[in-house]
Image: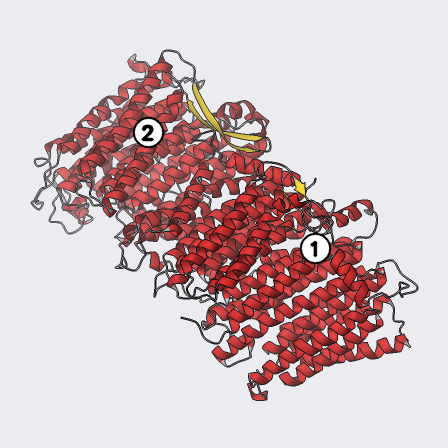
Amino acid sequence: MIEASFMSYIALALVLFSLGIIGLISRKNIFIIYMSLELMLNAINLMLVTLSKYFGSMDGQIIAMMVIAIAASEAVIFLSLIVAMYRLKKSVNIDDFDTLKQKGTL
Amino acid sequence: MKYDDIIYLLPLLSVGIGAIVLMMLSPIKSFSINRLSWVAFSFLIIALLSNTLNFGMVYSVTPFSGIFSSMIVVDTFAGYFSSIIIAGGIVTVWVGTHYFEKSNMLRGEVFSLLLFSVFGMILLVESRELFTTFIALEIASISLYSLIGFQKTNIRRVEGSFRYLILGSFAGIMFLLGIVLIYAGTRSTNMIDIAKYLTTHSSQDMTLVMAGGTLILITFLFKIAAFPFQNWSMDVYESAPLPITAFMASTFKVAIFGFILRFVLIDFHELKNIWSDILFYIAILTMLYGSFLAVFQTSLKRMLAASSIVHTGYLLIAFVSINSLGESASTSIIFYLIAYFLSSMGAFGMLSYIASDDHLRVTYEDFRGFSHVRPYMAAMMSIFMLSLAGIPSTIGFIGKFYIFVGAIESGYTSLAVIGILATFISVYYYFKLIALMYFYPSPEMKGEIPPLKGIPPLVIALMAVLIIWGGIGNTLISYFPGIDFLIDTAKLAYQSLFM
Amino acid sequence: MIDSLFLILSLFALLGAIGMISLENTMHSALSFVVSIMSIAGLYALLNASFLFMVQIIVYAGAIIVLILFMIMFLNIRQEHAPKEPNKFPTMLVVAIVLIPVNYLIFEAFSKMPHIEDFSVKIDGFGDIKMLGVELFNRWLLPFEAISILLLVALIGSVVLARKKERE
Amino acid sequence: MNSFFLAWIVLVPFISSILLGSMYLYSISVKKIPNSVFTFLAVLSPLISFILGVLFFIGLENGASDYIYEPYTWLQVNGYIISMGFLGDRLSIFMVLFITFIGLMIHIYATGYMKGDEGYGKFFSYFNLFIASMLLLVLANSPIIMFIGWEGVGLCSYLLIGFYFTEPLNVVAGNKAFIVNRVGDLGFLIGLIFLFFYVGKLGFDYGALEEYVSIVPNHILTIIGIALFVGAMGKSAQIPLYVWLPDAMAGPTPVSALIHAATMVTAGVYMVARFHFLYDLIPNVGLFIAYIGAFSALFAAVIAMKQTDIKKILAYSTISQLGYMFIAVGLGFYSTGLFHVFTHAFFKALLFMGAGAVIIALHHEQNIFKMGGLRKKLPLVYTVMLIATLSISGIPPFSGFFSKDEILLKAYSHHEYLIYAIGLFTAALTAYYMFRLFFVTFYGKNYKEHHMQSISWSIKAPLVVLAFGAAFAGFMGLPDVFGGENLIDGWLNMWSGKALHVEYSVEYILMAISVIAGLLGILVSFLKFYRYDFNQKIQESGVVYNKFYIDEIYNFLFVRSLQKLSVFISVVVDDGIIDKTVMSLSNGFINLGRIIGRMQCANTRAYAFFMLVGLSSFSLYLILKLG
């Protein structure tokens, strides 16, 4: 049985963080990409809260709370941009948005 | 409680209040665009003037240290950088007024968001606590995301904004992880405490701090568009409205450097040589990548975006040599930032000024024979190009000179050689524009280009004059401030970091 | 007791995360993410962060995720709208391999921290709302104020970006 | 003479250029300004500089020490101090004198040549800037300041060559000049940086450099010497960086005269002479320079034999003459090289201006095989061209003879017989192709009658003045043999001249040989082209038409094979290899850029993946670094 030590929390947070990066890069669905970013923030929060307990100081928890606020503010921008994008192209596939591609002509 | 501390916070407060006032004014329809820009301008100029109150002194104050628990510091360094940032805001306001009017997308919110962005950047250079820095970065970035995607019916704008948002958030998350690691390693997020911890515990294992610092460095490299974190910049610079591109390319870069210099010089003073090897290669790759990208562009906007990657490379040269020559390398970075700020802000500003109702003039071909239609504008544009290319007697040359000499002095001769090579390549794509403007007959376009009238061209012309002034030095009239003045102030700024 | 709770919660958190990044359907994926979020909230409770436990449930699960779900339904994204992703799993494998050095570095760095035998806090009321509030308004006032500005910026930004019609 | 006025030698044309430029902008956008105003300003500035130069000359002659004027510190980087300094020693005042004098003449000439051109004011603005840059280059007190002038000259040549930008070809020529010059500049800059690195701490003006250059290790010194010479190659059009010069003929003729005679191309020679203290320490590099010069001289002369464009012939002849100068400076005879710079300035300016007069008279016809029989029509131009052609061919007593002969003599006495032979052979070729130009232009039969345009006095006057110079300037460097005193050597006494170990009798013989070589060239040319029949289709058929035995032999032995060689060199080597290499390098770079540009695929996930790879490699680096 694994002891619920400091390191096991960190390991869990790291795995969640990596899963977030994996989702960000390998998925095409805009919503899932966004949720992957949120997952990474959650993983970092978990680390912060763990550190807060480890150090016996509230700093970690306070930062974690403010990170949630930052995540909320990013969420607003994200979702309004997603709406704008969906209105324009009727697609949630991020690879469809490539109008800025470098043209190879001189 | 000391109420006179409020003087030091005046720039920050003035910009912040200005942003909120503009937000409230923007729904009022009777308030014309011109009036809004005057409001924005007056708040910015108050901020700039209050910055000059302490000019020329070495000072370092932590205003309201009890309330804010020393998380914010106002020193010569912050004053220097925030002055540049506010100046960038002022230029963007004036140039932007004209552009947004023309492209029919101006609303008061633009100015509000712009001032919020300036607010975030000032907080970024003044903050001495890593998490506050992160929030400041987010304030600046989120305003920029909104400004880029402002015209939401334009697919390019929205797409660029979204790409920047995803990648910027990703980079922001790395920054956050870096803060967490440093916090885990030192139990503090305050830069002074971290520096103290690092000097007193130098025998201990520093893997956490190193890893955290590296992650923060990656965010920094992302924001200044260094290889391999540079791809976004081309797309975002191209998609953004021109004044916003100007603001991002020059002012934001200044702010980011303001933060990272403080971070590296204070926190990693003892350990900053750990990155020198990898930054060495990054500087080379950045310069090469940018040069390769810039030479074949047809769009001027893209070329300037690509060349801004090259300029990042030059700045990184000085950044590499920072561990052997702290003061002079930082000074040369600061000086080069000013040089680059003036030149690129001028070039982008000119581009956005000549945008007309139905035609954005952003490709090389649009400038064919330009000098015959608008000779003064062509002359200014040439000055900006000459300065970007680093031709002697412009400020850009002196900036490059300092960087290359510093690189050679600290033993990075190969970096200097590659930098000079990149400069030579850059002459090709900058002079292509000059050649097109001067050596071709002009098509019929006189009616479309706005004449030199109003404040925007005045601002642009002022920058052109400053470029020449900085290049020839304090020299023609010796008691007038010139580059020596700038460099001396930059040195004071450096010294104020260690007070 | 705590250990087995940790195991169950972390299992759910991982399963939820894996489900989120691998499920085809956007809606399923979002629901799977809720599982992960809730489990993390539970972990916060285990870590003596009772206030954060609530914030996590209210703000994340209650607001952000609901917003996402609402948006998915609002835009009426059905399975046939979802992008085709045949190479999803190979890409994941590649990314996972590239991630190894990052994870190794951070894990190694953390494991070098001084070991604490008894991983529990002795302070009374650690992590509850009072302690958090006192700390927040004493030492973290500046970031707090900055966050309020950030939310204001996000507000303006979203109004600008989501406004239905361009005003002439 | 107050050394303060040294700066004004540069500042006067500079200020005048700015004035002219802004007046020009005013005149095209607001209100027309009469050309006479431009003329007055444009001609005034080189005149003032010339007068100032003369005053300094008198000062130095009366025994004043070198003038140094350092108004301010230009740059100051941790211990390195670079001041904006001007140095008026014998070498720079010598250069100033003939630059401003020839420049003045060309300015006067240009007022006639450019009359009626739309860009009249712009032209003189560039022109004055050109003079100012060149004067800055010459008067600079440190290599860094010199580099500003160096770049300024490059920029102005670019602007002037592409002056008629409505022709795409001219723009290409301007670009080519600029790019090729940048290659040279890169070399120059690398040399400077090395020099700066090793001795910069001790001061970076010429005085300090001369004092401390010996502390640089010898192999580094070799690198510096070669790198600096690469810069000279670019400016002074030596193999392989000469390709821009013939194309630079696209500019208006006064520009060609200015570039070829007084300013840009002599910059390289001046630079080597200025760094004489450096090159004295590395004689091997000097020898290398001399050989490059010799081969350039030969190579360009061979190409010139086949050209039909009057300005192109003169362009190649410039390359060839520059080769002579590099022979002299390479072997360490700096004053001899500068003597040739001096005489060359006169006769080459004269040649170009004469050619320009012909071109103007014939309504911009440049092909010599469409001219012919101009002797009667343009008697003045005929006379001055004859003087200039005799001078460049090395016929005594015209100026070219003295300087060229001295170079050959020095090469001989220095036991560089190969160089001597090449120089001698080139001298014969020079006489041949120059007189070919001369005869075809002014003599011949069955030529088409031309409708002539009259030539104004402002074109004629400088021709006459320069003709005197081309005829008699050589007497300033009269060799000892004739009981004269070499005034140039005496003036530039800063170099401990290497003694000559040649008997007078040998000197006479050498002199005779070179005169004979020149006369031989003229003779062949005379036989072939004096009665040139313009009804011939192309000039090669003239080979068939000749009646003279000697001509046939000569043709068979030399001309034919040389012509083949000439075609080979100009088509295969020049256009095919050197031109292509320079151009394909830049094209390759652009194409590589396009391939790399594919990374900008506008795919967010790909960008994120690049970032992740970056993150991963940073982590790997840290893992390795921290163990």
Tell me residue D213's x, y (percent): 55, 26
**Mark 2: amino acid:** Val
Distance, label 2 to label 1, CA atoms, is 56 Å
Whether residue D26 is visible: yes
Q: Residues within 10 Å of mark 2 (few under 14, many from 20)?
A: many
Whether residue D590 is visible: no
The answer to which image quadrant residue C12 occupies is bottom right
Left/right placement of residue B365 relative to residue D348 reads right
Quadrant for the C terminus of chain B, please.
top right
Find disc 2 in the rendering and name its residue: D12
**Discs 2 and 1 share one subunit:** no
Find disc 1 in the rendering and name its residue: B130
The answer to which image quadrant residue D39 occupies is top left
Scheme by which the image is coloured: secondary structure
Residue at (66%, 69%) from the top-left corner?
A: A71
Tell me residue D624's x, y (percent): 75, 56
Query: What chain letter is assigned to the residue under label 2?
Result: D
Q: Secondary structure at mark 2?
A: helix
Q: Residues within 10 Å of mark 1 (few under 14, many from 20)?
A: many
**Mark 1: amino acid:** Leu
